[in-house]
Amino acid sequence: MKMENTVNTLKGMLLAWAFIYATGSAAAPRVYEVWENEPAPNGGADWDLVKAGGKPFDKDWEEWSYPIGNGYMGANLFGRTDTDRIQITDKTMHNKGIYNGGGLTSFAEVYLDFGHGEVGNYRRSLNLNEAIAYVSYEKDGVKFKREYFMSYPDNIMAVRLTADQKGALSFAVRAEIPYLNMEDKRTGTVNVRDNLITLAGTLPFFNINYEGQVKVLNEGGAVKAGEGSVAVSKADSVTLLIATGTNYRPGTHIFSSANHEKLDPKLFPHDEVSSLMAKAEAKGYNALKQTHLADYQNLFGRVSVNLNSQVSAEPTHRLQDNYKSGEMDNYLEELMFQFGRYLLIASSREKTLPSNLQGIWSQYHYSPWTGGYWHNINVQMNYWGAGSANLAECFEPYIEYFKAYWPKAQEHATAYVEKFNPSRLAEGQGENGWIIGTSANSYNISGAGGGHSGPGTGGFTSKLFTEYYLFTQDREFLEEVGYPAMLGMSKFLSKALVPHGDLLLVEPSASPEQKVRDKEQLVGMPGSIDKKGYYTTTGCTFDQGFVWENHTDTLMLADALGKKDAFLDTIREEITKLDPILIGTSGQIKEYREEEAYSDIGDPKHRHISHLCPLYPGTLIHSGTPEWMQAASKTLDLRGSKTTGWAMAHRMNCRARLKEGEKALEVYQRFIQERTAPNLWTMHPPFQIDGNLGTMAGVAEMLLQSHEGYIDILPALPKAWNSGSFEGLVARGNFVVSCHWKEGNAESIGITARSGGECRLAYPGIESASVKDSKGKAVKTSSDRKGRIAFGSTKGETYSIAL
Ligand code: FUC
């Protein structure tokens, strides 16, 4: 008991410290929990649905289990009292996947047999402030508790089981290798010795050697190896440690070699996994937990958003049911935002692979869409909010991933130019730039051309690098990776352009996944369709738009670095010939140049709104182009928001950029009502993490924007969020921003200049407000128009503005 108190005090201190450090304010952080009064059901996969839809479907896993993760591995927790299930995924564990190029597959199942069946006072929760999951209940007068977390610094999963009476813990621990003797031909054995369960084997498609270890450490009582399990009897408390590993070693060889040559078949992860376990065991549970909390809370504790709500006393599914029946609780909107931040931290940490389509979590043999990195919107969406939600570090895995696939992407660019525009082919490594097509995973990437998405997928991807630089001001990154990547993409895109009269148009060009509705639509149209009905044409808005974005960003970044290159003049010239945005007769932004009225070509309700990428995440359509803004709004009205998970998230961000706060909130509400499971995961369906992370970006985008060269405070505030506050959101230029508002009006704004430089702010009436530095000294400001001010900031200094 005494120990627990000390731990709790320490925990509280850490939380408070993380918060004060990040925000400069000592307000108590709110507790965000996803919780229920029942364990997660565990009916297993519905194989009829799997077979019928060709998609794996385990409703209970997808909708009720709670995810934890540390970037390397993830686990889904059921919190059961009869047999608990801990399903484990490792990001490198791939079989051939559904398209034969690799796909994420489940690593292990760990079961805890308690046989407690009916219990009293049951509660399970996922505490987002701590990234710790809890289970507590009573059985026969004994109070049982469990804590589960996954530590990033120690790369270990730890489970702590306690009871309020000595010797009350008796249960068995088992582990299984899933999908043995199935199509992917994985081999493996489960060995139990003393208190250790080892799962080890091979998955032949990429020659993956894998190993997982589960160790059972008891205090009091006894632990004994049995037939396939470790039996705990009459212990006072127990710690389980779980670690996984494979012979995957990141690097360019992964993407440049043939499937069977990517990994060293003679390399076994045994020593690595054993060493993780030994270190964790020596460190002990409490120290592991403190390290985990310090690491996690340093990230999570940076941002608070209060939308004038009360912390709900309802279990999450009830909160959600009420929300579905029209009781819109702002707390759920906040909770979803913070859950998004939690998921990004859990699935994307430095030195791990990026967050994939399911983040890191998959219980499947073949994951939906391979659990890959889909580059026609999904993986980009995962990172849209990393900068603004003060989690820029979480984007670093994508930078490392890019560096690893870069040479292969250069080969793809050369092959593309050879095929589609041979007269522009350049000699020399990288001279044709690089390109990534839609599909990719931890082992392979694809090229562009001739598919359902045009080369705009490249500009869509490189946008992430520009954003990372703008948010972090990391010049080393810019010099070494960001700028060369942007310049390379410009080189490629320049060669994807073909002269048409005075214009330069991408050819071939495709607006992601749009199909013609029927052959009638093709009559008189210049494009063609492939076997699946995908429409390929010339110069669609998606492709033209991303050439504009990438070229414009390259020039801006060249300026920032003082680069001079003759090619920069070429792209300066090309930008003037793109004619990327056209308005049609329905008042819409055209998706295709050949379209006149809305949806002359394609599905009018299609989930992709690729022709609005110039609005978000792009910047071509902005407040200085009011006609385009209006047409973008019209396009969203016409497309409607009855759509899938991530597609709603894109609409939400577009509405925020249009400063349409009410409409942005409407989509967000619809998303929570229709596309969110009780564990708050996004149902595309099936489960995909992009919608969670995309709507997280959307909330930030409603509260703070900075893509037009100034910081726009509360740009899309809906009435329902009339009063509230945020602390710790980040604006481009690396300014940490806070704001308190009442009755729709900002009362105070705080700015911490993490990099210094000129700070430009927009808010009605701000020109008559006073700006003070951290010592209360008045700061000189200038104003070139109503509602705008600018002042020179000093790196590390904090400024406050009273309105
Ligand atoms: C894109 C989307 C699909 C799905 C897949 C993973 O191709 O169009 O809806 O999200 O990615």
Image (cartoon, rainbow, N blue to C red):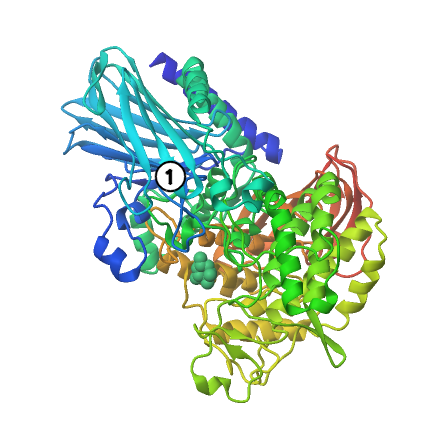
What residue sits 61% from the left and 30% below the top?
21
| Residue that lies at the very extreme toward the bottom in this rendered image | 524
Q: Is residue 230 above or below residue 766?
A: above
Residue 481 in the image: x percent, y percent? 70, 44
Give the position of the N terminus as an image quadrant: top left
Q: Is residue 542 above or below residue 343?
A: below
Horizontally, is 302 left or right of 281 in the view? right
Q: Is residue 705 left or right of residue 220?
A: right
Task: Give whichever of 535, 704 is nearer the camera.
Answer: 535
Is 531 situated above or below 370? below
Give how far across and how far down residue 27 sits, in percent: 54, 34
Q: Secondary structure at mark 1?
A: strand
Label 1: how many residues lie within 10 Å, few (<14), some (14-19) or many (20+)?
Answer: some
Answer with the quadrant where ligand 1 appears in the image: bottom left
Whole-percent x, y for residue 434 in the image: 66, 55
Q: Residue at x 78, y 57 (%)?
A: 555
Camera-side residue of 238 and 572:
572
Foreground residue among 577 and 394? 577
Cβ of mark 1 under 8 Å from ligand 1: the answer is no
Q: Which residue is mark 1?
A: 203
Q: Quick check: can you spot residue 593?
A: yes
Is residue 570 positioned above or below 344 on the image?
below
Q: Name the image quarter holding residue 41.
A: top left
Residue 708 showing in the rendered view: no
Q: In the image, what residue type sits under mark 1?
A: Leu
Give the percent coordinates (x, y) of residue 337: 47, 48
Q: Residue at x 51, y 64 (%)?
A: 651
Which one is nearer the viewer's eye here, 504 or 380? 504
